Amino acid sequence: MIEEIFKHAEQEAPRECCGLVIADGNNKKYIPSENLHENNSSFKIDPKLFTHHQLFSKILYVVHSHYDEDCRPSEHDINNCNAIGIPYLIVSYPDKDHYILEPNYD
């Protein structure tokens, strides 16, 4: 699945790609989303897609890419991850690394 996310990042570069990893029975599935943000270095997942999967499946990760930089989370990533309570899976492209950011429930 990570290769599928890297491929999406490649297709969207230099824009950030975004999507969701959901539980599909006993499997994980990547659901790509159109990036609705105007800025190339930010992302906004389609709210209808997010709400649908929040209601009808289990969202395991919110996914987005960092183009031409490392995959460490920004302060904005940390704040949003904590606010929604869903882990972030951040990939870097083109160096193809990834980082999982867990929400802080404190």
Image (cartoon, rainbow, N blue to C red):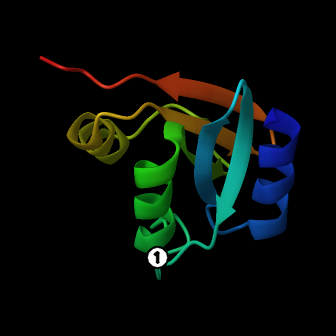
Q: Residue at x 12, y 17 (%)?
A: 106
Tell me if residue 2 comes above or below residue 15 in the rendering. Answer: above
Is residue 98 shown left or right of residue 3? left
Q: Between 90 and 51, which is closer to the camera in this rendering?
A: 51
- Please name the residue that numbered disc 1 is placed on: 37
Residue 25, percent from left and from top:
69, 31
Tell me if residue 106 comes above or below residue 57 in the rendering. Answer: above
Q: Residue at x 40, y 22 (%)?
A: 102
Residue 48, percent from left and from top:
44, 72
Is residue 52 shown left or right of residue 94? left
Screen quadrant of the N terminus: top right
Tell me if residue 58 comes above or below residue 54 in the rendering. Answer: above
Q: Between 23 and 80, which is closer to the camera in this rendering?
A: 23
Residue 11, percent from left and from top:
83, 66
Q: Secondary structure at mark 1?
A: loop
Is residue 31 shown left or right of residue 10? left
